Amino acid sequence: MERIAHFLVTRSKVVIALTMLTTLTAAVMFVRMDFNADVTTFITSSSDEGRAFVALQEKYGASDPITVLITRKDGGVMTERKGLELVLDVKERLKKVEGVRAVGTLIPDDNPMTGAPFTKETLDAMPDGMLPYLTNTPNAEMMLSDDNKAVLGVIDPGEHEILVGEAVAHVAMPDDADVTFAGNPTVFAKILDDLSWFLLAIPPTVIFLLLLVFTVNIGSRKLAVLAIVPAVMGSIWTFGLIFALGYAVDLVTVIVPIWVIVMGSADGLHFVTHLQEAAARTDDKVEQTRSALREVGVPMILTTVSTVAGFLSMLATGIGPMMQLGVFAACGITFAGIISFFFLPALLSRVGIEPPGPHAVGHRVTGLLEKLAATRVSAALLLVGLAAFIAVFLPQLDVNPDQLFFFKDNHPARTSFAKLSDAFGGATPLMGEFVFDRKGDTHAQLQNLAVTSTELAKLPGIKRVFSLADLADKLPEDALQKALQKALQGDAESPMGKMVSDDGLRFVVFPSDIQPKHMQAWASFVDDHDDVRVLTGQPMLFDAMSRMVMKAQLSSLAYALALVALLLLVVHRNLWRTLTALVPIAVTIAVLLAFLAASGIQLHLMTAIMSSIVIGVGIDYVIHFLAAVEMEATKGDGYGLRAIRHVGRPIVANALGIAVGMSALFLSPLKPHGELSQVMWVSMVVGALTTLVFVPAMLPKAATTPPNDDA
């Protein structure tokens, strides 16, 4: 480390200039920033069910529909003239929105009697006795609630789904109507707003909280700022890379800079605290840098590698968003590690370093930890308490199948979804495909498919199945032939897309009660009927994702443990020391998973990644502690206690810094971010505590025996 220290101090201007130039280049890439709020890409890109869903949409030219719930504010029924007038008024207003391709309600686009466009004048001219005929159609049956007090509308948003989803929410509606929008485009529009707000508010808050914790523990505001600089630069480099490669900010990548800042700050913190101690012994800048690098240089490299290994283990999940997060977070941690090792020493060599003061809170905390570690009773009591917690709650761990898991309980998207679910069973219809030969006997095929459709509608959890097969016995012969002819020629479209292809007939399912057991029954029905090619939709995709999440949790956890164990074995070349280092990690992971069950958070796309991350981060504490143990062991008995005195302060500061810094995620409007904050609090506190209490208890007795102990 002598040559590296000498180079970094004597060539500090060159190192600083190159780092700043790279940072500026990365910052320029921010002009390419883009957002992707389409949450369905998380599912469709990672499973066979998702790919089948996309293929069916493309085959029939179907976009994700926007569903509309229309009710009267006076609580009246919608089949009365006043209700129909409101439906028609809402429909006409929505059709004027730029980008809207079609709007479907129980009122047809064309007058069934004349074929002319159905307008307000048409409705006004209809006598009251004719109104029941208007609502006695297949469309009306599908789009009218059981109590006739709610009407379902369906909007085809065309190619610009999110823009239309945002635009329709701002349309002025009739004073007497209560209109609620749901469906993926409106959900994605809300997520887009949330992502923009997140990037503006959360990272600065995280940095402020980290500075607060680091300052309290280090005792110097200036050094706290410098300790965080590499992590902030690392996040800028990472986002610069993301934008340079053409990736957009989405629900997953938006969290990357937070991980990089809170975790990448660890190396900077360790280097600064050791440089403080070196500054108390000498004023020679080269000697200060050499001393700090000799003590923490190798651990900094190892902790960077271990954290990167934790993130890269997500590649084993096979889930696109998790793999993407793992790669970019690993890049960010690597960047922060490089900057901490080269740029930070060069920068600190040009500023004054304040020795640690007795007022720093970190010293008091490490003093308490020394007392706990001095006796194995503390470790035994802690182990018993944590084991009891794990035994009670870990068996209750399950997957959260909620397709709106990313929204808080009071979010408008949840409110809208609940309203449509209460009235119609679900805010997002399912879709499927019947086998249909355009060259065969059309009428006979439709009759057979109508029977299958009726059987499907009788399954638990299904309210209504709609397809052109339903028209076989419900329209006059002339009207039926006209509708079929248009459909077979590909001219007839609905707000949900085309309903006929060369070899299939598309159908739409409106669920009444979405439960995993019901979805299993639907899937079995498809398997048992040769005339049903596929049934898919958002609820079924999220059910498939839930199963993938559980598998991903196990695979990423196994790979992360294997990578970290291999790293430790190569470094220490000692099986017992490797196993000793893994104990705090194993306990922390078990506590984390038990906490997910105890808190009701459970596993979903975001929380499933935490075990691997905690392994990569938590092992950092063990690496730094064991490195200190090796250095202090040459000085006689009590080396375990001296190791705590030596590295306990930065370990505690880092654990609290990460936990407190991640508390900024409570400000996020997206629910998983607040849950991640809770998880990090538990993981970091337990990880640091078990490292500084369990590991000394596993060392020889001499490690915790003061040199002047008579025993």
Image (cartoon, rainbow, N blue to C red):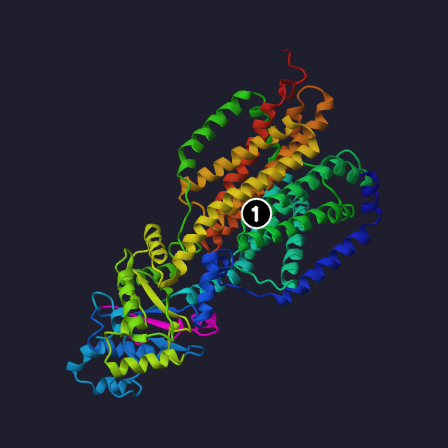
The residue at 58%/41% (across/down) is: 560
Q: Circle 1 — which element? A: helix
Magenta segment: does it hold 363? no
The residue at 66%/26% (across/down) is: 642
Residue furthest to the front: 440
Magenta segment: does it hold 171? yes
The residue at 42%/77% (across/down) is: 100
Residue placed under numbered mark 1 in the picture: 316
Residue 565 on image: x %, y %: 62, 35
Residue 502 drawn above or below residue 358: below
Q: Is residue 137 left or right of residue 95?
A: left
Amino acid type for the residue under numbered disc 1: Ala
Q: Nearer the viewer, residue 552 or 22?
A: 552
Residue 118 on image: x %, y %: 29, 84
- The C terminus: image quadrant: top right
The segment highlighted magenta reads 149-177
Residue 379 on image: x %, y %: 53, 25
- The N terminus: image quadrant: top right
- Residue 365 visible? The answer is no
Residue 323 drawn above or below residue 382: below
